[in-house]
Image (cartoon, rainbow, N blue to C red):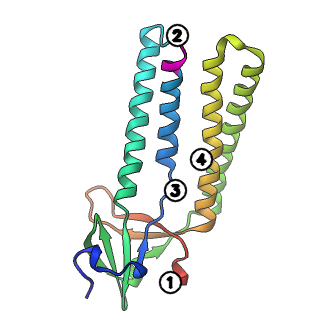
Amino acid sequence: MAPDRLEHVPERLRIIETLGGQFGLWGAMFLVVAGLFLLSGKGPSNDVEWLFTGASGAIGLILAGYEVWRRQNRTVLFKDGDRIAVYRRGRLDMTLTIDQITRKKPGLDLALKVGVCLAVAAAIFTAIGLTGLLRDEEALVDNLIILTLGLTCWTSLAAAAWIWLFYDHWRVPIKSWWLAEETVLVKHWGRK
């Protein structure tokens, strides 16, 4: 019988969810963009720029905050005989049979679609940002923003590829009004 609280499960028996960090990555990009506007010396010069700066900062804080929250509330699995105990927020959420959890890695076609889109966007934004930095000293902040977007796309592509290649994707049922199951990323599940 699985314990009610996660702290009663020995650490060596816990299968802890791994997170890819996409929310934090994009949140940081939005915060950098807002910071570039504010710290450029000029600051936003009209209402539209203030709205853009404020929205960018708010989106960045929301995404970064969500990433912090996710990291503090990871799903933890515990194999208890022929059953899997699922812990969320440190408490036993449900106990499942092994066949209720399925391995569902995204297909190569989806990975290529996402990867190609990110790579094209990264190449375009990086090229525009670098070209602008070399040619137009007056638009330094604008070019840094574009370059930041390009570098974020490259980093996002690398993170997505790493997760797709080296982690198992397990579909675990969840008690939610809007989701039937969640994807739990686990490294080396089959070796435990």
- Is 38 part of what is drawn in magenta? yes
Residue 126 position (above or below residue 96): above
Residue plotted at (35% across, 57% down): 72
Q: Nearer the viewer, mark 4 or mark 2?
A: 2
Label 4: state its secondary structure. Answer: helix
Distance in Å between CA atoms under marks 3 and 1: 21 Å
Q: Which residue is mark 3?
A: 20
Q: Residues within 10 Å of mark 1 (few under 14, many from 20)?
A: few
Residue type, numbered disc 3: Gly
Distance in Å between CA atoms under marks 4 and 3: 9 Å
Dot 2 or dot 1: first in sequence order is 2
Q: Residues within 10 Å of mark 2 (few under 14, many from 20)?
A: few
Q: Which residue is mark 2?
A: 42
Q: Quadrant of residue 108?
A: bottom right
Distance in Å between CA atoms under marks 1 and 4: 29 Å
Q: Magenta region: which residues?
A: 37-42
Residue type, numbered disc 2: Lys
Label 2: state its secondary structure. Answer: loop
Distance in Å between CA atoms under marks 4 and 2: 30 Å
Q: Which residue is mark 1?
A: 192
Q: Which residue is mark 4?
A: 156
- The answer to whether mark 2 and mark 3 are in CB contact below 8 A is no
Residue type, numbered disc 1: Lys
Distance in Å between CA atoms under marks 2 and 3: 36 Å
Residue plotted at (72% across, 20% down): 132
Dot 4 or dot 3: first in sequence order is 3
